[in-house]
Image (tube, rainbow, N blue to C red):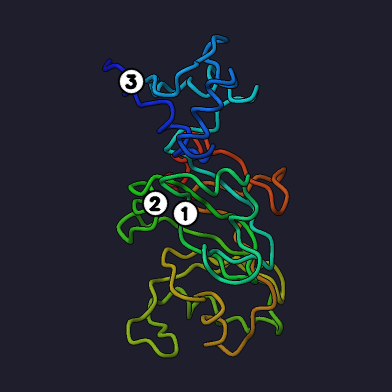
Amino acid sequence: MSAARSVRLDKLLANLGYGSRREIQALARAGAIRLDGAELADAGDRVALAPDLPERLTVDGESLDPLPGLCLMLHKPLGVTCSHKEAGPLVYGLLPERWRRRDPPLSTVGRLDKETSGLLLLTDDGALLHRIISPKAQVAKRYRVTLDRPLTGREAEVFAAGTLVLEGEERPLLPVRLDVEDATRCAVTLTEGRYHQVRRMFAAVGNHVAALHRDRVGGLALPADLPAGAHRVMTAEDVAAVFAGG
C-alpha cells in the first residue's frame, strides 16, 4: 500500500476554507492546531492526507472538516436555487459557512429547480460528478409528482414509448417509467435530466405539475430522518448505491 500524499498544513487548511495562509499561521502560533494532541506551531509543516486525519487533527478544539473528495446528500427544500450566483436563497447557504470557501468548491450534481424539493447531491470531486451525470452511466432519478388534474390513464404508455418530443426540441425523450399512486399522484423514473423535464412532460399530455419532489438517485434514497434543509456526508456505500440502480 502506498504512503498517503502529504501537503503543507497552511495550504490544506486554506483550501478547506479556514482562512488565508497568514491567518492559519497565526492559528498555529497560538497553539490552536493540534495533531494527535500535540501542537503544530508551524503551519508550514507537512501532514499526510490519511483518511483518519479529520479524526486526529483539530482546529480550535474542533475536528478537521472532511478532506477533499467530499460528497454530500442534501434534502433540498422549496424556494432555494441550485446556483452560486443567482439572487435569492441558494442551496450553498444551507451548508456550513466555511464549506462555501473550499477549493476545489462544492458543486451540485445536476440541479433541482427552485420549486422542486428532495434529494440533491453535492461534491468537490469533479470526476465523480461527471461520472454520475454522464449519459453513459444511466443513473435513474425518481420523482414524486402531484398534478393539478387527474391522470387520464394514457400517460404511462406515452412516457414509456420513447417517442415523446418536448416543445421546442427535436430529439425524443428516452423512455420514462410512470407508477400511478392515485388519481393525481404518481412517481416517474427517468435517466435524462433535460431542463424542467418532468414538468414539460406532463404539459405535453395536457396536465400541470403542482408539486415535485425527488426521492431517489440511482439506488440511493433520501433518508427518512434527513429533514428539509439538512445535509449528511455520504459514505463510500452511499456513493456506490448511486450506481447500483433502484
Distance in Å between CA atoms under marks 1 and 2: 8 Å
Residue name at image x 55 percent, y 65 percent: 112
Between tags 1 and 2, which lies in front?
Answer: 1
Q: Nearer the viewer, residue 237 or 34?
A: 34
Residues at marks 3 and 2, CA–CA distance in whole angstroms: 24 Å
Taking the image as shown, residue 148 lies to the left or right of residue 31, namely: right
Residue 88's x, y, as percent? 65, 69
Which residue was labeled with disc 3? 4
Of circles 3 and 2, the one toward us is 3
SS state under label 1: strand
Q: Earlier in the sequence, mark 3 or mark 2?
A: 3
Q: Amino acid at mark 2?
A: Leu
Mark 1: amino acid: Ser
Q: Residues within 10 Å of mark 3 (few under 14, many from 20)?
A: few
Q: In the image, which disc is placed on residue 107?
A: 1
* Whether label 1 touches label 2, CB < 8 Å: yes
On the rendered structure, is 194 left or right of 149? left
Q: Which mark is residue 129?
A: 2
Mark 1: give few (<14), some (14-19) or many (20+) Cα within 10 Å: many
Residue 240 % position (x, y): 44, 39
- Disc ID at residue 47: none
Quadrant (top left/top right/bottom left/bottom right) for the N terminus? top left
Q: Is residue 203 above or below residue 112?
A: below
